[in-house]
Image (cartoon, grey):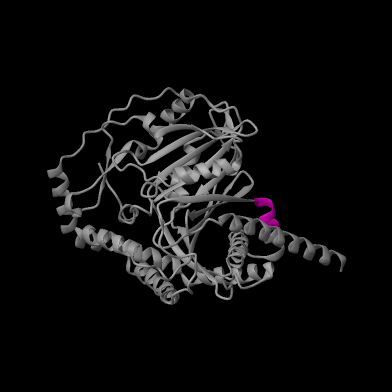
Amino acid sequence: MEKMSALDASFLDVEDAVSHMHIGSIGIFEGPPPPHEALRSMVLAKLPLVPRYRQVVRAIPLSIGRPHWIDDQHFNVDYHLRRTGLPAPGGEGELRSLVGRVMSQQLDRSKPLWEMWAVEGLDDGRWALISKIHHCMVDGVAGTDLISVLLDADPATARPPAQEWTPRGAPGTTSLLAGGIAENLLIPLQAARALPSPEEVFRRGREALQGLLRMRDLARPTPQSELNGPLGPHRRWNWARAELSEIKEVRAVLGGTVNDVVLAAITGGFRELAISRGEPVEQPVRTMIPVSVRSKSEHGLYDNRVSAMFAELPVGLEDPVERLHSIQEQMADLKQSHEAVAAEVLTSLSGFAAPLLLALGERLATRIPQHNINTVTTNVPGPQLPLYACGRRMLESFPYVPLGGHVRVGVAIFSYNGACTFGVTGDYDAAPDIDVLCHGIESSMQELLSSSRAMLSSAGRE
């Protein structure tokens, strides 16, 4: 039995009938699709490396303590491995529609919180694997590690036979209640023990204060936009593509980081979306950017270690190079301001809050209209070598980001084997036009590439 962290528990608390807190990935593989038994054997062989996949959430009565992870006494891998086929003609449009439907369904809290869908019938002999996992189990960076665990780096990898697994006994209600009461009584002592050295307290306090001063701008509401509003339970999903080599080429000529270039392309996409909707572009689009605070020593652990920064995408700038330079300056300023440190401090403080009050606060926060951010953009670096499932090479991988609160559109970015992909999630009814955003991301990226090559060519003629 293992107690859930405060941050992990918050992803359960904010989930409701319309905000489903699962993340996901969609891998497209070369064919033919493997038989169900082959895929089943692959997953069973890897489950000892990810024990959370055979555990369920057990809540503490009256929410007087944080939930616990316990072994599922009735674990059946066949419940989690699903198989389906695409309708004709089996193109990428049909796949994207299927992903939207699969991701619209909430995970069953009485089971381990994950599913995998093998999808047959994709054109050109390909097949797809939809992975769906609750955010309380894993953040984006740890999720990348998880993909590396479940898939193989060598198509000829010998798979060991599945190990016999016996679940540990489940605790009784009385035991859980006693543990929850003890947890609340020990909060002051845990807080005292968590205090670092005076020098570390001073350093982190100074950085947190700088970040909190920077975050005061979040109190200013964003202009009214169709990007915000009540959510329905259903989702649309689409994607955009770019080459990592081209992103690095733009960075080398125009400056900034890979993340800056990616955000500039997304800014161009939101500009095109606003124009197509007839909305003004004078005001920026404010986005939350999740930031991993996972240290190198923490890789291989699958809980959440994330903080956040908040940026304003300059959709009012028509020139793509000016958008990039604006993003570049802003992100440099955000890093110096220690905004992510401040957000992490605020998050860590929740670990010492009474779980019942924390749960009530999280639920309340999701029901109050949010006016301080318009969207979320999360960028996760993935493995830069080909991966395989049952000997079939994964050709592409696309990410899925959930929507919550009153944010109707979210963008996730993932890099794999030289490619950079964008997964765009939209509310089914309020964002039927996310294809415009995807087209804008790709066209903005090409504009940046053309500008950088033109600048390089001009410099060569001088």
Q: Nearer the viewer, residue 137 or 231?
A: 231
Q: Nearer the viewer, residue 73 or 434?
A: 434
Q: Is residue 103 magenta?
A: no
Q: Looking at the magenta stretch, what is its main secondary structure?
A: helix
Q: Nearer the viewer, residue 221 or 226?
A: 226
Which range is magenta? 242-249
Could you tell me which residue is drawn at 26 percent across and 32 percent down? 73
Residue 346, quarter of the rendered image: bottom left
The count of marks equals: 0
Classify residue 196 as left or right of residue 212: left
Q: Is residue 247 magenta?
A: yes
Classify residue 103 as left or right of residue 389: left
Classify residue 205 as left or right of residue 153: left
Can you say whether 395 is above or below 250 in the image?
Answer: above
- Residue 196 visible in this rendered orientation of the protein: no
Pinpoint residue 29: horizontal percent, then vertical percent: 58, 35
Residue 123, quarter of the rendered image: top right
Could you tell me which residue is drawn at 17 percent across and 46 percent down? 176
Q: Nearer the viewer, residue 333 or 284?
A: 284
Could you tell me which residue is drawn at 28 percent across and 59 percent down? 351
Pinpoint residue 371: horizontal percent, then vertical percent: 42, 71
Could you tell me which residue is drawn at 37 percent across and 54 percent down? 18
Task: Assign the C terminus to one quadrant of the image.
Answer: bottom right
Residue occupying the far right of the picture? 461
Task: Assign the N terminus to one quadrant of the image.
Answer: top left
Pinpoint residue 412: horizontal percent, then vertical percent: 52, 54
